[in-house]
Amino acid sequence: MNLTLRHVPHFPHFGPLLGATDFITTLRLRQVTFNAELRADIQQAGDRYGLPAALIASVLADEHVRLDGADRVQDKVMRLSLRLPNAGSKLLNFVERLCGRSVDTFSLGHSQMKPVTLAALGRLGYLEIPADRIERRRLLLDNRQAPVLVAACLRATADYWQAGGVNIESRPEVLGTLYSLGLKGPCGVHPHPQANGRGGAIAAHTCWLEERQMFSAVGTLAVLDHPAAEKIPNE
């Protein structure tokens, strides 16, 4: 895949939203690929929640390229705690003392979703979630569930704004922005929501996937394997 400047004019609606950092992000997003199982999961999540599979894939890709060293350490520690039922709680207590905050404030898994967000989606009826705290963490860390978590959050966001009289379902740049900010965003529901650069990059990548027919009409992601690709693993 050649990542060149000639792709930018394909996104006239989102180009003005992209600063230099966000433009680089759009190039990195194009290098992210998904294995066959995750491609199928993305399709099913899109069908289930009535959302473009390309948007779900773009949010997952965005979360993936933004992972830093601390995020990866958190992920490994949380996964390890689930494998050590006897010592897991002691490990998490140590981590909380070290970090100065509860592990329930960590963003987990491919969806980079916090437990409090998961709980809200369950309370609103968008997901069935376990009552047990540990099982909720297990759900967040289950890579196969990440597309469903992202789709549920996007659907809840679109519905929340629609209930306030503002339709953002066809605004991937706004949905992409709100995914990391919360249902309401910093200003609450208002008639003229604006995207940030991150949302613009997500929307641009969504268009890029759709323009190249990497998804079918029902949301199936085409194969995107190439040597330079940065793959999201399934394990």
Image: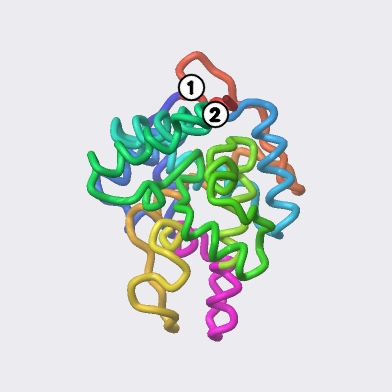
- Magenta segment boundaries in residue numbering: 157-176
Q: Secondary structure at mark 1?
A: loop
Q: Amino acid at mark 1?
A: Ala
- Residue 5 seen by the camera: no
Query: Toward which corner of the image does residue 145 lie, by quadrant?
Result: top right
Residue 78 x, y percent position in the rendering: 44, 35
Magenta stretch, main secondary structure, is helix
Q: Horizontally, is 25 left or right of 121 in the view?
A: left
* Residue tagged 2: 33
Q: Which mark is residue 56?
A: none
CB atoms of marks 1 and 2 within 8 Å? yes
Query: Toward which corner of the image does residue 2 lie, by quadrant?
Result: top left
Instruction: Indicate yes or no whether the magenta region holds residue 12.
Output: no
* Residue tagged 1: 229
Residue 13 x, y percent position in the rendering: 43, 59
Q: Secondary structure at mark 2?
A: strand
